Image (cartoon, helix red, strand yellow):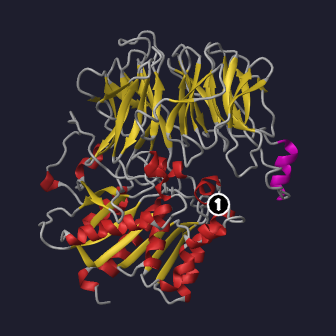
């Protein structure tokens, strides 16, 4: 299981960020004219990411920022969700789509002179290549080639070269074997790993700087242009955290190790003066990246900038021209926008972005914002006046009725304070008891935060109250809270869930006879665990869950995260076993819907099969629905709609009043 993955692409909760919206939509209907959300309509959300200001000397607010490029992910259509690059132009005040291929474009990166925009795309072949488009017009042209996909790239400071990460291209012999189905592969040994390459932009010539047996995952140029800093490992076959940071000489590929963090880390960047490398990493060895680390290029130990003064997970950050840092940190259900001056002093700003951000040389901030009744849009803020909304990508959502969450806190079994949110149906009288669905986030180090959470908004339209607890293990409440369920999945975290349910029952909101539970990934695991520990839930939905933590460790992609929590099952099987729902399945009575993609490598198909087989053995009403081709996060339109309809039907079948006796 990959905890950080869930926080980026998992389902999160929609909340207000605390400032007014000017020009929110064109011709928005009144409340009386709004429509109820449907599964089909809920897919029509655009999302925004990877904001990039142009280095345009003519910009009115400093040495950068005349244009803003960003990536828009379109709603699912057919079997894909396509991504395209958009540009907001400061001079015209308008945002427009910039790329229009029948495939996808992502990772926009401006040339240092701001005259060209490079990006990744698979528009001409299956493999992802680097394309360049002139800002004066014309079509994009591929500047890399070969039967291999480019993973990431960056322009050199002088714009004459591009450093990129990609494996070696397939040879003619390899292609022939693949075509003839003579394609047996030795695991690990035959895998092609991403290397660091240098591309001469003028000639198109490329040369590799690192060995094919290594794997490179991130890169950043030093301002001097003679070295590239990379995150990589010489042991890519390892199931442990073996990544280190190296500097690589562009001239001859000489590598020098800079630091070896003990756990997972990422988001590596270079300070404007080239004297400091920054990255988000753990304080010691895990469970995941949390604090902003600063590594002087002449040292071998990093300093934790945010641990003592912030103690919140850093989600995004940028260096400013004067050497200060501006960052976004998770804080409960919302975020914090914080700057650190060159002397290390913390200064809080407002508003707080809910997603990606970018900063100009003069300090203007572009950010993605969203709220309880408005999906993602791009905003600009000069840190003086009011923020300004500059896109209207999701104005069609003005027609739907969405429920505002109520935030509250309650005490768990041991006195730990848990923050949660509650959605209640429109027109709720505040007196009657409601059927309640508990939804658990992924992770375990995820959280419910600022985004539209489709399951809940649809369940509310069906008359349910929806409960979102940020149980122990969630990010946004400090490092100790994140670590609180180490070796204790299904222990204190499950008790946090039940304490919240009891609180809502005591308050007269939840009907104790009509309780349901559900979730995806770790949320699916918690639903599975719940049905083996209690019979209070009358319906459960487990999506891509984990029934057997031992076989999960042996088959999942990147098990190092689970090793942090439990060790390895060959040496310490007891913890894995005792926290596995399948051990307790003979206690289960709750009707359970099991949903799973058959291409899921994060929580593989076998986990849901083990759960379903056990439920069948003990006569529990259950259905297993397997979706072909789907990975951990679904992307096919019909599957997404089918999944939502099945969830609604399952809860309605077992929790609706008129069917309670069936």
- The residue at the point 76 percent across, 22 percent down is 205
Name the image quarter holding residue 311. Answer: top left
Q: Is residue 598 magenta?
A: no
Q: Residues within 10 Å of mark 1 (few under 14, many from 20)?
A: many
Give whichever of 562, 32 is nearer the camera.
Answer: 562
Q: Residue furthest top?
A: 58
Where 559 falls versus 211 (above or below)? below
Image coordinates for residue 293, horizontal then vertical, percent? 54, 31
Q: Looking at the rendering, in which quadrant would you find the C terminus?
A: bottom left
In the rendered view, does 127 fall on the left or right side of 290?
Answer: right
Image coordinates for residue 259, horizontal then vertical, percent? 67, 31
In the rendered view, does 324 fall on the left or right side of 511?
Answer: right
Note whether residue 461 is visible: yes
Image coordinates for residue 209, horizontal then vertical, percent? 78, 27
Give whichever of 609, 33 is nearer the camera.
Answer: 609
In the rendered view, does 635 fall on the left or right side of 662?
Answer: right
Note whether residue 377 is visible: no
Q: Residue furthest front?
A: 414
- The residue at the point 51 percent across, 21 percent down is 137
In the rendered view, does 242 fall on the left or right side of 534?
Answer: right
Where 170 falls versus 179 (above or below)? above
Where 13 falls versus 133 (above or below)? below
Q: Which residues are magenta?
A: 171-181
Give whichever of 225, 162 is nearer the camera.
Answer: 225
The secondary structure making up most of the magenta span is: helix
Image coordinates for residue 176, horizontal then vertical, percent? 85, 50
Where 217 falls versus 595 (above or below)? above
To which residue does mark 1 refer? 556
Q: Looking at the rendering, in which quadrant would you find the N terminus?
A: bottom right
- The residue at the point 58 percent across, 82 percent down is 613
């Amino acid at each position: 299981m990959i905890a950080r993955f869930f926080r980026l692409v998992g389902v999160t909760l929609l909340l207000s960020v605390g400032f007014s919206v000017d020009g929110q939509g064109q011709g928005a209907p009144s409340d009386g004219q709004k429509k109820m959300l449907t599964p089909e309509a809920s897919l029509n959300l655009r999302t925004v990411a990877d904001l990039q200001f142009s280095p345009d000397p003519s910009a009115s607010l400093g040495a950068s920022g005349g244009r803003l490029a960003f990536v828009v992910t379109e709603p699912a259509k057919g079997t894909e969700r396509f991504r395209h690059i958009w540009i907001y132009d400061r001079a015209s005040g308008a945002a427009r789509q910039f790329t229009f291929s029948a495939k996808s474009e992502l990772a926009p990166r401006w040339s240092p002179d701001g005259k060209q925009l490079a990006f990744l795309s698979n528009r001409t072949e299956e493999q992802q290549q680097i394309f360049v488009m002139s800002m004066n017009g014309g079509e994009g042209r591929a500047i890399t080639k070969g039967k291999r996909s480019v993973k990431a790239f960056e322009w050199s400071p002088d714009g004459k070269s591009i450093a990129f990460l990609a494996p070696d291209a397939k040879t003619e012999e390899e292609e022939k074997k693949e075509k003839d189905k003579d394609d047996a592969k030795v695991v690990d040994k035959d895998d092609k790993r991403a290397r660091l390459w240098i591309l001469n932009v003028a000639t198109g010539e490329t040369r590799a700087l690192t060995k094919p047996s290594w794997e490179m995952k991130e890169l950043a140029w030093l301002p001097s242009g003679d070295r590239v800093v990379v995150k990589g490992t010489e042991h890519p076959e390892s199931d442990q955290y073996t990544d280190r940071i190296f500097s690589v000489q562009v001239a001859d590929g000489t590598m020098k190790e800079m630091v070896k963090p003990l756990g997972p880390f990422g988001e590596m960047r270079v300070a404007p003066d080239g004297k400091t490398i920054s990255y988000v990493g753990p304080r010691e060895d895990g469970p995941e990246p949390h604090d902003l680390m600063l590594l002087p290029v002449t040292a071998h130990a990093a300093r934790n900038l945010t641990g003592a003064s912030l103690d919140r997970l850093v989600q995004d950050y940028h260096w400013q021209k004067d050497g200060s840092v501006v960052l976004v940190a998770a804080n409960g259900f919302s975020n914090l926008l914080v700057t650190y001056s060159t002397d290390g002093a913390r200064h809080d700003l407002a508003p707080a972005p809910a997603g990606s951000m970018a900063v100009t040389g003069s300090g203007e901030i572009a950010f993605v914002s969203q709220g309880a009744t408005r999906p993602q849009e791009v905003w600009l803020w000069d840190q003086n006046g009011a923020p300004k909304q500059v896109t209207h990508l999701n104005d069609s959502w003005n027609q739907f009725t969405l429920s505002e969450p109520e935030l509250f806190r309650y005490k768990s079994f041991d006195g730990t304070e848990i923050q949660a949110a509650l959605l209640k149906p429109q027109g709720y009288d505040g007196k009657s008891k409601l059927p309640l669905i508990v939804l658990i986030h992924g992770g375990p180090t995820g959280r419910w935060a600022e985004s539209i959470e489709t399951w809940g908004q649809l369940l509310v339209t069906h008359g349910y109250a929806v409960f979102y607890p940020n149980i122990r293990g969630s990010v946004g409440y400090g490092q100790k809270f994140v670590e609180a369920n180490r070796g204790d999945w299904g222990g204190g975290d499950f008790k946090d869930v039940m304490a919240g349910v009891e609180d809502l029952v005591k308050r007269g909101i939840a009907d104790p006879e009509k309780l349901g539970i559900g979730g995806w990934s770790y949320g699916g695991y918690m639903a599975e665990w719940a049905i083996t520990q209690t019979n209070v839930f009358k319906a459960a939905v487990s999506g891509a869950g984990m029934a057997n933590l031992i076989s999960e460790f042996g088959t999942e992609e990147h098990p190092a995260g689970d090793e942090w929590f439990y060790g390895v099952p060959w040496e310490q099987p007891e913890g894995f076993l005792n926290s596995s729902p399948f051990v307790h399945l003979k206690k289960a009575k709750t009707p359970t819907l099991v949903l799973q993609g058959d291409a899921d490598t994060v929580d593989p198909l076998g986990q849901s099969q083990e759960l379903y087989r056990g439920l069948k053995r003990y006569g529990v009403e259950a259905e297993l629905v397997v979706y072909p081709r789907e990975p951990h996060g679904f992307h096919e339109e019909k599957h997404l709609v089918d999944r939502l309809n099945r969830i609604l039907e399952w809860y309605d079948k077992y929790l609706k009043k008129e069917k309670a006796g069936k």
